[in-house]
Amino acid sequence: MDQHAKRILVVDDDQGILDSFEVLFGDHYELVMADNGYEALRIIEAEPPGLVFLDIKMPGLDGIDVLKRLRKDQKKVEVVIITATRQEETEREAKSLGAIDFLMKPLNIVDVERIASQVLA
Amino acid sequence: MDFKKSSRSIRLRTRLILYSTLVILLVMALTIVLVEKRQSETIQEEAQKRGVTMARHLAAVSTNALLTYNYVVLKQSAERVVLEEDVLYVIIHDKEDKVAAYTQHDEKQGMILADDVSQKATRAEDPLIQPVLYGEKDVRVLDISIPVYIKESQEKWGTIRIGLSLEGMSSQILKTRLNLLLLGGLAIVLGILGSIFFARRITRPISRLVETTIAAAKGDLEQIIDIQTGDEIEELGENFNHMIEQIRLHRKELEDHLRQITSLKAYNDHILSSMTNGLITINMDGKIVTLNEMAERILKKDREKMEGSFLEKSLGESHPLFLLLNGTLSSGKGIFHSEIELKENGEVLYLTVSTSPLTDGEGKKIGVLAVFEDITGLKALEEKLRQADRLAALGTLSAGLAHEVKNPLSAIKTFVQLLPKKLENPSFMEKFNITVPREIDRINHLVEDLLELTRRRVRPFAALDVNALILQVVDLHGEEMKKKQIFFDDHLDKTLPQIQGDAEMLYRAFSNLVINAIQAMPNGGSLRISSVLRDSEYPELRITFSDTGMGMDAETAKNIFNPFFTTKDKGVGLGMALTRKIIEDHQGTIEVTSEKEKGTIFILRIPVIKISNCQQ
């Protein structure tokens, strides 16, 4: 299936984060939610999104693991990391694995909206 | 000791020689006397017999001449006889006792001799022998007289007298005596020589025996006595050899023992000196008996000065080490790993000390032993580790806190930022009203839990039934367990006594443990909960939660009670930290053992607090 230009995948184990993306993008983009890494990979395989917001700290497969798997499978997806803890090492690793940006929680909707519009333009 | 031949005693050989010489002398003397007497008698008898024979012969040939008073013939006969050896004189008396012939004195022919001897001789009717002294030289003579009878009548016709000189006999006797003495002397000399020889023969092995015993007594046990006399002395020698062999074996045994003891002592000394712990022993008087090098180093005291002196004086009466040793000395009870602090010249030393009473082989108390270790370095390291642990825990806590706070904050921020734009949007407002308070509540709960973790318990304890609490918790999660095919294995001891505690907090702790177990068994399994009373001086409840779930690795098990440490899909990671706090608030302990793919066991020990203590 072709990559959907307007489809955004949000991956986070926190319901509040998913809810906030719902109210932010629900009216403008096609939103898909996943609360774990496995679900995220399944969705990316089945219906590739134009942009992925990916949490780092998740039980099971975490954000970094998802990035590694994507690189291994040679999936070309734009990924933006969203995380609560700033760890330079994690940020560097995420970027080296192809993440295009690294956003800290609490998220600023201006940054999120800007990135979405830039990537999905 | 000085072993030697006694100087006062007479040597056995001398004694033997003396005794045998004496015996020989006596025997020889007696023999000589007896033989001499017998010889003398024999010689005398021989002489008499000869005299008598000569006289009888003369009488026989002289009978006719006497009958006829033929003095010439009688004289001739007498002259013949007097030529015989030792015959000094021959006198023939006629019937009237007148001298018919007198070999030495012709002039006395026809006279009657008036001397006593002649009178007795002429009057005798039987042969008569009279010892007399004859002549001017008083020669000892036997005067042998024989009366002459005619066969047909009993009438005496004359007397024949022969004077037999005893000088020859005497010289013969003397000669015999001399021979006897010579022989006797020779016999005595030979006897003495023989006795010396035999004494030597007898005493030589004895001397050898004596020499050997002296050498043995002086310590030379390498002697073997070789006596082959075939008698008691040989037997004695053999026995002595046997005895020496025994002594040698005993001595060797003793030497071996001594060597063992010496090497054991060296070994002990070596152990003592190479021990990395300090060691002091004192006797019942409180005097220091042993002090090893490490003790010397730790206490910074001079060992030479301390050993043998009173511990109290050496260390001072308020020295903690002295107090511990003294305590054990008076109570008889040892102390295990007591930690003491020594302050000296502004330097602080930490020691762990163990003491125990010392007893001898028969169980009699002989003193006290203390072993101590300088743990100052260890203490410092421990402190560093604790600090590192604290920092790491703080790191985990901060990271956990950040994660748990920032997620709801992020949601709230998004909703709030969108609010001005979407104020008129009822669907947004509906979501706003649900999400924002919920996220705020999450933060609030987190804060509450954190506070709970650090809060001191303020609610008083009350009597409660642990089993009932556990069953309530299991009941609450019954539905979920059934769904996940988790079997509840009830091992609760229904006879448990009530304990003093905070029911609400314990309920929460048990609840956390049950939730933990359920989450560890997503594919079903069994949760076994047991409770049992350990009755002792300090009775305690022992409650275990065992699941057959996925288990944890050692690292996870080690950290499970740290705040924000979680491996679960849901939850913030404060559950186990809180559970531990609750159990510790009840003066209890909680431990976890786990094995990957096998399951996890939580063991809780809660003391049964007595009513009087329940107000904490």
Image (spheres, helix red, strand yellow):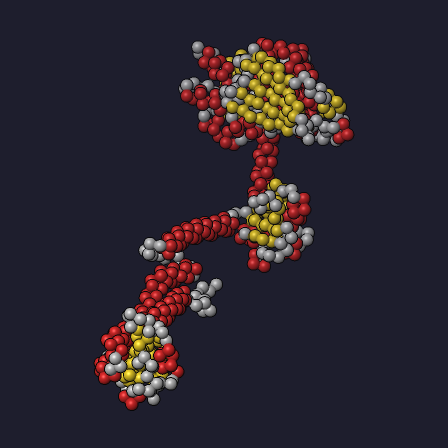
Q: Quadrant of the C terminus of chain B?
A: top right
Whether residue A24 is situated above or below residue B245 in the rendered picture: above
Q: Residue at x 60, y 33 (%)?
A: B394
Whether residue B437 is situated above or below residue B210 in the rendered picture: above
Q: Residue at x 23, y 84 (%)?
A: B72
Where is residue B33 shown, x and y percent of the image?
Answer: 37, 71
Where is residue B194 shown, x and y percent of the image?
Answer: 32, 66
Q: Is residue B420 visible?
A: no
Q: Residue at x 61, y 11 (%)?
A: B480
Q: Residue furthest bottom?
A: B107
Q: Residue at x 33, y 73 (%)?
A: B155
Q: Is residue B236 visible?
A: yes
Whether residue A111 is situated above or below residue B112 in the rendered picture: above
Whether residue A96 is situated above or below residue B327 in the rendered picture: above
Task: Name the side, left or right, on which A105 lies relative to B151.
Answer: right
When asked about the image quadrant of residue B137, the answer is bottom left
Task: Name the side, left or right, on which B514 lies relative to A117.
Answer: right
When asked about the image quadrant of residue B583, the answer is top right
Front-lying residue, B191 or A95? B191
Where is residue B186 shown, x and y percent of the image?
Answer: 30, 71
Front-lying residue, B65 or B537? B65
Front-lying residue, B63 or B197? B63
The mark total stands at 0
Where is residue B196 shown, x and y percent of the image?
Answer: 34, 67
Front-lying residue, B529 or B83? B83
